[in-house]
Structure formats: structure tokens, C-alpha cells
Amino acid sequence: MTSNVILIEYYTLESCHLLRTSVIADACGDQKMSDVQIFDPPHRVPLTKTKSIRKRLQEQGVRLLFTDPALKYEPYRSLAMSAIEPIDNYADTTYYGPITVGTPPQSFGVLFDTGSANLWVDSIYCNTQACNSHTKFNPQSSSTFTSTNQTFYLPYGAGSLDGVFGYDTVNVGGIVITNQEVGLSTNEPGQNFVVAPFDGILGLSYPSISAGGETPVMDNMMQQNLLQADLFAFYLTGNEQQGSEVAFGGVDNSKYQGQIYWTAVTAETYWQIAINGFQINNQATGWCSQGCQAIVDTGTSQLTCPQQYLGYLMQSIGAQADQYGGVSNLPTLSFTIGGVNLPLPPSAYISMVSSVAISSTYLPSQNGQPLWILGDVFLRQYYSVYDRANNQVGFATAA
């Protein structure tokens, strides 16, 4: 099977960068080339890195058990059949940024999540402790708000987050989207979101997984011709550093070094891509010789490997896992994506207390291949670009 490596070069024009994409096949293949315009500067949204829900609860003496991270992706088995989207696994998210909703604008901090597709925020319709500890949207104070009768719920722990959809103007990094569907919470039980640093979630996945069939923010940006290029990109810093951002409509050349390597989206649901190989300390494992899939997810800090590989991984490196998901002494891991090896050194995901953000999942991908989840521990190493126009994901070494 031919493996493709995609290289890019920039050529400066007066108003944009011309992105020359070279698709280089193997030695027996032909070289193909296409030009894509990437406009610069993009619309940037600064992201704040903070303590996760899990960490905040641990400081209060509450230790959460790790659930299967891939439960978040369960809806793909019955896509868009109901307004349901599990959010059990937002306990480890740490990055959020500002948006406004309504006229005049009301400000919120939201998680920008490539692992979901809907936009929702806390609202005055909700009076639980979790809602009362956050900024709440007041639709009565917005002259551009339109109500609907469509409700939604998101399974969450022992209860669920309930809400109702409405339409309003949303501002994301200076991009003004009109008639955007917004979920407004009406009931938010449990303790996890009481300590959450964000007021809602802005999903950036494909519309096929949108709860209730609502149009995602990115799709409205595209339909309303608000972007110079139909893509967005993430730059995530480590520790408590500032400078994290999500950029819409272009790439931020100062946030990466070298080339951007592209790989095709394999399922237009989540940002799902193929993994062609996996190495431990440069030694091939053969695990993905028959193919693996990965979901690139900014909404989780975890690096998640298929359950059938975790035991061997722990054994081969001499590490042990406990019931809370903590492990230590991991070597450099390397993923082969689009024919390019992308290494992940131990320093990328070993925490200050010598634990590693790695867990396992029992859920396979849609085509039955083993499923990985590339969360923030991976994405802090690589500037990631999500190209809706060409349905591809790009990775470059983060600056």
C-alpha cells in the first residue's frame, strides 16, 4: 500500500501565503502537487491553560477514577439520531478561551474542542450549584436572540446536563457569526462542573456528530464566508506558560518550525486520521501494521492507546498502571502518520509528580481498527492544523 508524505513550502504574495502542497508518494509512485492559499494573519483566540477539573477536585480530597476516554465518541454509532453527546471525559481538559454571545455581547470562557461539534454555555435557565458558579447567558438581554423548542441533554456522571437550543450572534476572535445555534443549559447536576474553569464548550468537529443536527460554529463561518481559508489551527503551551491559541482562517507562522505534514481525514465525524506505525524507543512494535485510527482531540489531555496494547506497553517498558491511570518511566513513543514519524518524548507527558497522562480504551474505531486518542500531551509537541476544505490534518513541530 502506498504511503504518502505531504510537504509544504510558503511563497509570499501581497495579501496571502501560497501554500504549495507536495504529495510525495513512495519510490514507485508519482509526485503530485497542488496549491492552496493560506491567508495570514488569521483570527486568533488566546487560550488560557489552567488546572483541570480532576486536579481541582484532587486538591479538595476527591479523586476521580478514570473512565474509558473513548466513551466520549460513542455517538458515532448512531450519528445525529438524538441530541445526545457524552461529556464524561472533560475532567482532564485544561485550555479555554473567550467568546461573546448576544447583542450587546455577553462574555464567556469556553473549551475549544475538536472532539465534539456543538456550542453550549451556562444560562439563567439553570440554577444548580454548577451553573451558579459560572457566568450565565441571559437571552432576555440580547436583542438578536431567537428561541426554539428543541431541547438537548448530555449524559454526565449520575445525571445529565439538560438544555435548550436558541439562535444568536456569536463572536469568536473577531469573527462575527449571525444566527448561530447555541445550547443554553437548564440543569447541570453533579460536582465536576462546579470547579470547571470554563462556562461552556465550543465544538469543532464535523456536523455529522452534532447533537440535534445543529450547525457547528465552524460550518457557519464557512457558509457565511467569514474565513479566508476554511481551516483552524491550535498551538498549546505546556505548564503554566502563556501563548496558547486557536487561530481561524489561517496559520500562525511564528508558532511552528519546519514543515507542516498533512494526512487525510479517514472519517468525517471527529478529526479522525490513520496511524501507520508505532515505535517504542525507535523499535517498531508492529501494532499498527494492519492499520490503526486516531482521533485528534483538543478536549482531552490524555494520550489514549488501544486496550489490547496497554499491557504489552507497560510490560515492555517496565511500568505499572494503577486504577487511577497513573504510570511512570515511559520511553519515547513515536507515531507514524502520513509516512512521517512524530516522536513524543517522556518529557512531553510526564507530570511534576512523575505520573503520565496515558490511559486505555476498549472502543474500536468505526472500521474496527484499534483506536488511539491524541490529546493535549501530544498536541503540545505539535502545531496542529485542521483543514475542512481538503479534509486533512497537518502537524508541524511546535515552536
Image: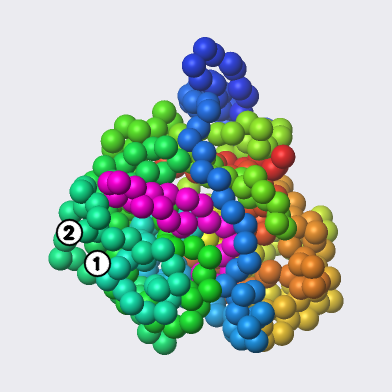
Q: Nearer the viewer, residue 259 or 149?
A: 149
Residue tagged 2: 147
Residue tagged 1: 164
Q: Which residues are magenta?
A: 89-110
Q: Residue at 77% across / 65% down in the picture?
A: 350
Q: Is residue 1 visible?
A: no
Distance from disc 1 to disc 2, alpha carbons, whole Å, reads 9 Å
**329 falls in the magenta region:** no
Quarter of the figure with the C terminus: top right
Crowding at dot 1, Cα within 10 Å, few <14 / some 14-19 / many 20+, comes out as some
Quadrant of res 62? bottom right
Q: Nearer the viewer, residue 177 or 131?
A: 131
Give the percent coordinates (x, y) of residue 276: 63, 53
C-beta proximity under 8 Å, tags 1 and 2:
yes
* Left or right: 281 as drawn, with respect to 304: right
Q: Residue at 65% across / 81% down in the picture?
A: 58
Q: From this view, report whether residue 76 is shown above or below residue 157.
A: above
Q: At label 1, which amino acid type do we have?
A: Val
- Identify the mark nearer the N-term, 1 or 2: 2
Give the percent coordinates (x, y) of residue 141: 25, 55
Q: Residue at 49% across / 63% down in the picture?
A: 198
Instruction: Give the structural element (helix, strand or loop) at label 2.
Output: strand
Q: From this view, report whether residue 268 is shown above or below residue 132.
A: above
